[in-house]
Amino acid sequence: MKDDLVNQRVRAPKSQTVRTVEAIQYAKARGETVTLTVDGNPVEVPLGTTVLEAARKLGIRIPTLCYHDDLCLAGVCRVCVVEVVGQRTLQAACSYPITAPIEVRTHSPHVRRARRHIIDLLLSEHYGECYTCNRSVGCELQALAMEYGVDFFRFGRLARPRYEIDASSHSVVRDMNKCVLCRRCIRTCIDLQEVGVLEAIGRGNRTKVSTFLDKPLADVICINCGQCINRCPTGALRANDPTDDVWAAIDDPSKHVVIQTAPSPRAAIGECFGLPPGKALTFELNTALRRCGFDKVFDTNFAADLTIVEEGTELLLRLKRALAEGDKSVALPQFTSCSPGWVKYIEHFYPDYLDHVSSAKSPQQMFGALLKTYYAETNRLDPRDVVTVALMPCSAKKFECNRPEMCASGYKDIDYGLTTRELAKMIREAGVDLPRMPKSEFDDPFGTATGSGVIFGATGGVMEAAIRTVLELVTGTKIEDLYEHADVMPVRGFDGARYAELPIRAVGPVPPLVENLFADWDWLRGATLKVGVCHGTANAMKVMENIKAGGRFSQCHFIEFMACPGGCLGGGGQPTPTNPEIRAARANAIYAEDRSYEVRKAHENPAVVEVYRRFLTGGPCGPKSHKLLHTHYTPRGKYIA
Amino acid sequence: MTSPTTMGKLTFDAVSPGVGLKAALAQPAAAVLDRIAASGLRGRGGAGFPTSVKWSMAAEADEADKYVVCNADEGEPGTFKDRVILSEFADLVFEGMTIAARVIAARKGIVYLRAEYSYLRRHLESALASRREEGLLGKRIGGKEGFDFDIEIHMGSGSYVCGEETALIESLEGHRGEPRNRPPFPIDTGYLGHPTIVNNVETFAWVVCILEKGAEWFKSHGTVKSTGHKLFSVSGDCSRPGVYEFPMGITVAELLEEVGGQGAKAVQVGGASGQCVPASQSDRTIAYEDVPTGGSIIIFGPKRDMLEVARNFLEFFVDESCGQCTPCREGVPKLLEGVQMLQQGACSMAYLKELCSLGETMRLASKCGLGQSAPNAFVSIARDFQDEILGRTGFGRRNGSDG
């Protein structure tokens, strides 16, 4: 399966340092070891280990700035320099591979002076006041300055900003005055995500991180994933923050302000309050939000279940046309559409494949559409006075809720998208101590949710939820009888791109929910459902290229795409810092929450059943749901005006 | 554009192309390497890395694709000797590259030619074409079965840092010209990830001479650690500027005498990234073990303002720093500001000391040779011409308590 993906065409220019990593991995693969000493302490490490890794193994701290666990090596900030005895110059610990038994000194006078100078130099070109910076306290530059006891601006400081702030994008705001040119955002955009919107331009101290032709971010092919924000060490990158507008709505007595919370932020928001990663605060958050003044608190999982029913039905309809009616024009595999970063990615990079993308809106938007129609009607509210807020782990959701096609009810489905970080700020501002809040339930009528919605946050979650529903609808067999505890293990994991085959051995009667669409399932008997899962747009590109080349993934029926590495729990609106361990801890929290639900299948959610009975009377993919819950996409291509 | 004046006879004048290559083909690759090792030849670009060591490491690399790259990005201020070699002795350079290919078993060579020398391209292409016709490039060179090698020319785009070998390789690959992390070195992970040797134009030409005239002949000139002759580009306040060939180890005073630069206040050896040798130290030798150079000699007469000299060099580095690493990107402008403060008499002794200390950090902590050598001129002028540069301040010797 992995072989299937190698030797793919590389689209984005790889930033230069990738090869260094490969060279190191090559040496490691040979399994040789070497013993070195760090500050006099001997340690044996695999050949090719970096000095930084070796020091960490010994518990010796070497400060870093441009280094990031998720990214390829750069060695540009030089904060991590150490003395390698015998070398003429100091070496960057992050990128110095150990190939011989060397002696390293991590805090000799030369090293300490160099680090201090480097921090002083960075501060001299860093314009911005810590008091007014949203990254203050979480800022890595600030932390370094404190660690090294910087008590004055040795090389002066800038009196005025050098660059205009680019707030053109709904999702990402760039303030290059605070940029320290560590280039993590560039490596994120080019190497991790393979989107390639950001690159360095200019030379010397006129170097800056820029877009194509230095255009505003809104005018280039940025997919709004916000992964650059998560990896920026300073306040140079941030999400476009609507909290003032949300407060204004809350403070306006004529407005009915409702908020929906997605599972990923609930699993991560504790990190903003000093808790270790992996502690979900779902029900504490409900109380906190009510204390902040939100009128109702709903669970996005309800809409996630609705999405699964709609998207799963759409898949079955496509399969029926392809398999039962032999219609060759059906676009298969069907692609998921809940990741707005992925949607913008495919609009830019593979516009020819847009008919593969499920027309079902994302849970956030479906919920919004129902809130301004069904909910407003049943509660005798004027939809004009209903303000819908969504707590999402995502910066791209901000762009999504501002898409012109997302107001089928006559109103914006969702008025404001908040990231985990922004909501944490609001909660603090309200004087609420989130971790110590008593627990409380979600509000009705959307209170009941299933575990299927919860796992949307982890890579493979949408696919697993869809499989639970589709297989049960088709086979009439309880999913627990097919997969132990309903855990569809084949689609779980953190591999970048995964492929699984799920045999349909027997079929059952058509359930009432979809009996107006299907007469029987005979055409599926003995078929094998082939599915794919990938996360991070770099992997999405590999899968798309594989499909184009007629590879294994082109045989799939359904593929889940998530723009962010790790899925939503690693989204661009999540707390910083991020790294693989933190994301794995959040995933554990999400799967634990799934297991805590009694109902774990979307189509069994009583609230979903109720909505179809009372409001979406045409059933899944019926006329009413089509108007409100489905959308269309825009082929954007890569042409930049 | 005309070539700079060549002063006196050069060794290259008397070397006929073809002889060296024939000698190289007549013996096993290891024997060629031994002969270069015996000559003690060190890189003529200025860093002085032993050529034979570089080549033997590349030769040992067990890979099918290897590359020979000629660094013709002669960008060091005050250097123009490669221009003369490429204009008049291109055959020697190509022959040296072919010998290198034979030694390390490379199949492809690339000349990275600086953008400003694009006028030389037609001349070089025709030299390559005639070598191909003569069977000195292409398949089965010199009738040797399995020895296939050809050379192509790749134009630079005007960036100084692309003379740094890893930045040069980045540029060859079509990326922004920025130095890579080292290790791994190009001999291990070079062009397109393959073992690559990068040598200066002049180094290749000397290899041919060594194969024709022998290692002993080469070693009989120069010093023990810096063997052989070297070409120098001499400019500035002297009566006879031009390209000279001198033995390594020549003293600054001897050199000044040869070129008519007596009475100079200082000599910049090694270009902007080199050292500024004051007249008081004119007995110092130009050699890798003392004052190294890639060939640039700039002479400053008695009337030169040394602060202007420092300012000029630093402005150059402000423009040419690639902007990648902090010490170089932010450090050079701080040094330049310091010079401007000195010129206005507004730099305290304490701050000057701080800047010199910053220069030391830049030398130690920068990512590549550019940043490591960028503070050289400033630091040596601040050290050796303190009276002159502080003469303008209110904080000079009379107010020494400030320092």
Image (tube, coloured by chain):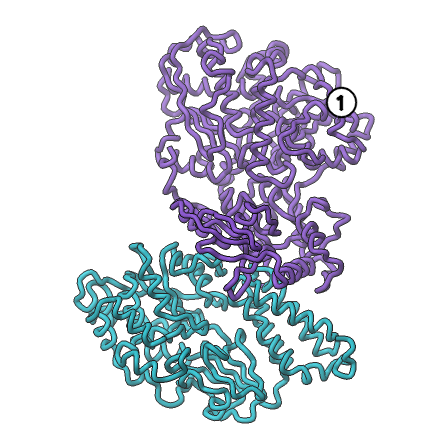
Q: Which amino acid lies under the numbered mark 1 shown in the image of this protein?
A: Pro
Residue A417 in view here: no
| Horizontal arrangement in the rendering, residue A105 relative to residue A165 (left or right) | left
When asked about the image quadrant of residue A295, the answer is top right
Of B393 and B156, the residue lying toward us: B393
Q: Circle 1 sits in a helix, a strand or a loop, which is it? A: loop
Looking at the image, is B365 positioned above or below residue A506? below
When asked about the image quadrant of residue A109, the answer is bottom right
Q: Position of residue A529 (x, y in %)?
A: 40, 20
Around disc 1, counting alpha carbons within 10 Å, would you say few (fewer than 14), some (14 to 19), or many (20 or more)? few
Residue A247 in view here: yes
Tag 1 residue: A438
Q: Position of residue A554 (x, y in %)?
A: 38, 30
Of B299 and B52, the residue lying toward us: B52
Of A388 and A294, the residue lying toward us: A294
**Which residue is rendered at x = 67% and y = 46% of the image?**
A167
Colour of chain B, in one word, is: cyan
Query: Quarter of the image containing the C terminus of chain B?
Result: bottom right
| Horizontal arrangement in the rendering, residue B353 relative to residue B121 (left or right) | right
Tally of marks: 1
Colour of chain A, in one word, is: purple
Q: Position of residue A72 (x, y in %)?
A: 50, 48
**Which residue is rendered at x = 70% and y = 39% of the image?**
A241
